[in-house]
Image (cartoon, rainbow, N blue to C red):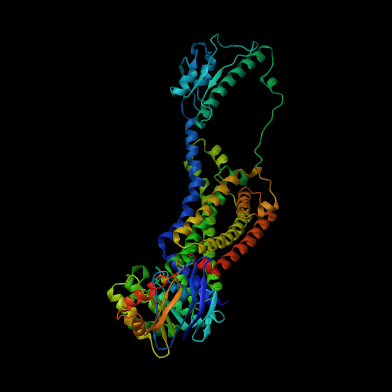
Amino acid sequence: MRWNFIWQVIYKELISTVRDTKAFRTSVLMPFIMTPLFIIGFPLLFGNLFGGEVQKKQVVGVVNLVQMPAALKTILESNTASGVGVELKPVTDPIKAVQDGDVEAAMQIPATGMPTSAGGATVAVQIYTKASSQKSSVVERKLSNAVEAYSRSLVVQKLKSVGLSEQTLEPVKAESINAENEAEKAGGIFAFIFPMLLFMAILGGASTVAVDSTAGEKERGSLEILLVSPIKRIEVVIGKLLAVTLFALFGVLVQITAFVVTSLVSPFVLERFGGKGMSQMTDVLGGNLNLGVGGFFSMLAIGVTLALMLSGILVAVCIYARSFKEASNYLVPLQLMGTFTSIGVQFGDFISRSTTIYATPIIGSVLGILDVVKGKATPEIIATIVIGNLVFAAITAFFALRNFSQEQVLFRN
Amino acid sequence: MIEVQNITKRYTAKVVAVENLSFQAKAGEIYGLLGPNGAGKTTTLRMLATLLEPTSGTLTVAGFDTKRQPEDVRRTIGVVNGGMGLYDRLTGKEILEYFAGFYNMGKQDTQKRIAELSDALEMNELLNRRASEYSTGMKQKIVIARAVIHNPSVLILDEATNGLDVVARRAVLEFARGYKNSSRVVLYSTHIMAEAEELCERAAIIDHGKLIAQDTISNLKQKANTNNLEEAFFRLTKGVA
Ligand SMILES: Nc1ncnc2c1ncn2[C@@H]1O[C@H](COP(=O)(O)OP(=O)(O)OP(=O)(O)O)[C@@H](O)[C@H]1O
Ligand SMILES: [Mg+2]
């Protein structure tokens, strides 16, 4: 092994890649665009939409509006802390009215009227909304809350008339408290973006170099000339592997920096530009990343070893290809795998965590990053992932080496 | 200097690219390897260059066996393939320095050699420009300079004039002629007979991986009863097709 030869190969790949300014700039900028977009942009967008719906005065169709008790009408039309009231409009066919979009929801007051005091039989009030629409859930909640409040007011009246207080209704009550820690709350349903972005950042930087320095050199014919010089094939492949790895590691660093920077600015941006529904929204979607020092290094350890493993796969696969285009085609499944695994594992609460699954390439790393984001990663988990990745990095590097020493691969027709 | 003995190259069970081929090229000559498309020229040259291993037979270059002393062989040869592969984002000088590095040429030797070649190939103004800016003719100059950066005693040219205009083609032929000397050999592979006729003293004609004839150019023409090499080539290769 002549390290001066290997270094020469690395150096050439480095300057070739960095001089491709457009591609290089993109690979640096991408994480700084995508990360804030997901972590700040989406919660902001959804939060404002959601908040907007709460603050909107929806039109609600009412069958037998004349029969509606004045007290209920007042509750429905008045603004409360949790949102503005609705506008009531008489209709005859509630389903048709909702379907035609004349009204955003409808309710049906019985033709026989509604009770104005408690004690008689229970009377039902139907509420019509489009159940699968996120927007209707807001107005639906407004209507059912109003009916419930009216019903309760009748009960309270009744209790008072016999000398009992409102508390009689509820001698004991359950109180739910969110026991997630800050990091878990931060995870949200958008947590999958963390492994996905990391995966994309690794491939983004490294695949250009991998394709260019293997399939690309093959297509141009320069690989043949390189192999005719006294450098050994193993030195060539180690050089190329290391060059690809350097860019993969660079991708990891850039992406983790983007995570850290975004998580530092996001609270301020969300507070400044977030609407009323913002706090609920960031709780659901995630918007704050609380890595902490341990989390930072765990993420780094997973990222670095994942980068090693992916570099081996990239070189082994790309050297098999005969042209840029063929190599790019081979890489598509690898890219999709990162995204799909990230999204799939997002619902990973069902996956039973085991050493085997953490040691599984890609899936293990994705799970691990989610665990880090949710503050659930233990040193054992991180160690399992790191060792698994290193073992697979060695295996893929071996395949890269083997492919370089096979003439059927290098001179495929 | 180049000895090819009974080599056979079988890519797959069905594809036999070269079959029991033998020829010798001596120091001081430009030796032609002639054959139609698919004859097995590139395959043979790749075996000489240690890139492919023959299924059977032996090849020696300057006394080194390609199988047992591949690195010695590689140190001795320079190769121009049809590919013209340069690194687009490197300058001509950087490309030459990159390859010189693998022959352990010192910095000074490398610069001296680049200056020499730059004069010989008239490529001074190319050296500090990136390869992506070159025309095909300019590229070929760097490709040739790269092949001989280490002064190899065996120069292998495979379709070296591919895609070149008249001027650039002339420059390549002239370089090949000038490169030959009493201790060097140039192996020139082509399917263009006019080039072979102009350049080579002796040649092997191959077709379908087999040797058809090996002789001086004039004897080859005599054998086929014509004074035109292209006609001779046509007559000789038609017999086996
Ligand atoms: N890697 C490979 N795998 C399988 N078959 C191959 C391979 N390389 C070449 N061949 C086949 O071997 C035969 C000889 O090919 P080769 O490239 O050596 O011919 P050539 O004389 O250089 O032709 P050309 O003038 O077209 O360059 C052809 O039939 C070709 O299809
Ligand atoms: Mg050929």
**Displayed quadrant of residue B83:** bottom left
Which quadrant, please, contains the N terminus of chain A?
bottom right
State whether residue A13 appears in this view: yes
Residue at x 64% of width, y 16% of height: A155
Direction from residue A399 to residue A135 in the image, left or right: left
Q: Residue furthest bottom?
A: B182
User: How far from the left and from the top, in percent, is residue B109?
Assistant: 43, 85
Residue nearest the observer in this picture, A374 or A55:
A374
Q: Quadrant holding ligand 2? A: bottom left
Residue nearest the observer in this picture, A129 or B52:
B52
Residue at x 49% of width, y 26% of height: A84
Direction from residue B117 to residue A198 in the image, left or right: right
Residue nearest the observer in this picture, A89 or A338:
A338
Above or below A397: residue A347: above
Direction from residue B100 to residue B117 in the image, left or right: left
User: How far from the left and from the top, in percent, is residue A325?
Assistant: 44, 58
Residue at x 71% of width, y 26% of height: A172
Residue nearest the observer in this picture, B66 or A12:
B66
Above or below A125: residue A379: below
User: How far from the left and from the top, in percent, is residue A156?
Assistant: 64, 17
State whether residue B123 appears in this view: no
Residue at x 49% of width, y 62% of height: A321
Q: Residue furthest right?
A: A171
User: How far from the left and from the top, in percent, is residue B117?
Assistant: 36, 82
Above or below A271: residue A301: below
Above or below A73: residue A27: below
